[in-house]
Image (cartoon, helix red, strand yellow):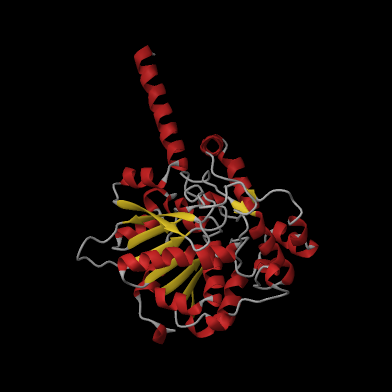
């Protein structure tokens, strides 16, 4: 074979491999630039001193009004969750349908590491759970978005992103009623004890949550480019093993994940892990035990804002029973949008074979308010 042809073939293979790896680990600006979407980068300061980075995608121009949606990522992730499915990503789906899309990343993640007083690796920095992500982070960026857009927003929460909004709403109902039009949850883990994941079942049975406080680390994970590229390369070369890892950890549908995905990961505070473990053992939705013994989040406060939920039949973390329990607790302002047999947990944001949960969510945000419940 001609040497020049061999070199050209090698170059094409290397270029394609690099492009794939780059997408797996790319920053939000580089992804949006790649697809040609306009965006802004906003910095929001929380009441307790954390600087959050929030991306505004497809923002309304002067004298223009667009519906606004906020997309909140889950545990161990960043706002990249809603852009990691290539051209079929959730954020782009809603932007293409006329929405102004806001993408916040919670404290500690790759985009939001700064605090005005506490160093990133200090114990004080990591003294938070999903409750503070709701009452501090979510409230700060919703206030910021409201000042700019002058309107209430739709909120899409994936996994812990839905958990934190319900916790915060139950504690500060008037604030969230004034800022939100509707809420939708994807893969919503509210009753952690109802998960079918064997690790969570054992954690609840063995009462591991008090033990976590003695572990001398403050957080697990953090985004690292080298690690991300290595994981992406591994998943490309050994896709079956990569899928097996995801199946053990998250759901039974890894083969339904877009091959662009699988490498993006981020950080979890150990106090959040303790909080989740406490709820698994107590079989409910409670505040962290530092607030007092068995202090339950009050669902009676979560009213007037319609709430929808999408549930995956193959989800090991957010079981169908989670949805049924929420339906019982929230009653009149809750709507189970669908139970989807093609969805596991991560596949809510990475699925590429069916997108009915996209359209069901969009239609729910578009339809009338409470009279239709």
Please give left or right for residue 339 compared with residue 359 in the image.
Answer: right
Indicate the position of residue 138 as horizontal and vertical percent values: 48, 65
Q: Residue at x 63, y 58 (%)?
A: 127
Indicate the position of residue 293 as horizontal and vertical percent values: 73, 74
Indicate the position of residue 114 as horizontal and vertical percent values: 50, 49
Please give left or right for residue 348 compared with residue 359 in the image.
Answer: right
Q: Residue at x 36, y 73 (%)?
A: 152
Q: As drawn, which residue projects farthest toward the left?
A: 63
For residue 37, say whether it is visible.
yes
Q: Residue at x 74, y 57 (%)?
A: 213
Q: Is residue 240 above or below residue 218?
A: above
Q: Residue at x 67, y 73 (%)?
A: 284
Q: As drawn, which residue projects farthest toward the right?
A: 206
Considering depth in this image, is 308 or 61 the residue closer to the camera? 61
On-image quarter of the C terminus: bottom left
Q: Is residue 360 above or below residue 238?
A: below
Please give left or right for residue 259 compared with residue 275 in the image.
Answer: left
Considering depth in this image, is 373 or 184 the residue closer to the camera? 184
Q: As drawn, which residue projects farthest toward the front?
A: 117
Please give left or right for residue 304 compared with residue 235 in the image.
Answer: left
């Amino acid at each position: 074979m001609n040497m020049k042809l061999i070199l050209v073939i090698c170059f094409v293979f290397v270029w394609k491999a690099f492009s794939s790896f780059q997408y797996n680990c790319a920053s939000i600006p580089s992804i949006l630039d790649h697809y040609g979407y306009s965006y802004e980068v906003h910095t929001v300061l929380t009441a307790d001193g954390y600087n959050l980075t929030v991306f505004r995608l497809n923002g309304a121009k002067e004298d223009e009004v667009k519906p606004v949606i906020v997309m909140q990522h889950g545990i161990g992730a960043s706002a990249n969750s809603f852009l990691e499915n290539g051209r079929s990503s959730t954020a782009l789906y809603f932007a293409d349908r006329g929405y102004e899309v806001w993408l916040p990343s919670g404290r500690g993640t790759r985009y939001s590491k700064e605090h005005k007083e506490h160093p990133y690796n200090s114990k004080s920095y990591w003294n938070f759970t999903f409750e503070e992500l709701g009452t501090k982070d979510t409230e700060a960026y919703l206030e910021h978005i409201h000042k700019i857009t002058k309107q209430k927003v739709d909120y899409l929460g994936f996994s812990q992103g839905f958990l934190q909004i319900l916790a915060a709403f139950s504690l500060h109902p008037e604030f969230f009623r004034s800022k939100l039009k509707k809420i939708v949850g994807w893969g919503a883990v509210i009753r952690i004890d109802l998960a079918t994941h064997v690790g969570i079942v054992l954690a609840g049975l063995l009462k591991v949550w008090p033990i976590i406080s003695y572990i001398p680390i403050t957080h697990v994970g953090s985004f690292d480019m080298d690690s991300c590229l290595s994981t992406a390369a591994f998943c490309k070369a050994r896709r079956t093993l990569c899928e097996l890892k995801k199946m053990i950890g998250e759901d039974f549908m890894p083969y339904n994940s877009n091959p662009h995905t699988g490498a993006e990961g981020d950080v979890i505070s150990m106090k959040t892990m303790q909080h989740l473990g406490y709820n698994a053992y107590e079989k409910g939705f409670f505040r962290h035990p530092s607030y007092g013994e068995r202090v339950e989040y009050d669902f009676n406060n979560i009213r007037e804002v319609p709430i929808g939920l999408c549930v995956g039949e193959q989800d090991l973390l957010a079981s169908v029973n989670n949805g049924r329990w929420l339906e019982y607790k929230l009653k009149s302002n809750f709507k189970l949008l669908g139970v989807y047999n093609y969805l596991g947990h991560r596949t809510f944001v990475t699925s590429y074979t069916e997108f009915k949960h996209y359209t069901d969510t969009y239609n729910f945000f578009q339809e009338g308010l409470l009279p239709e419940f």
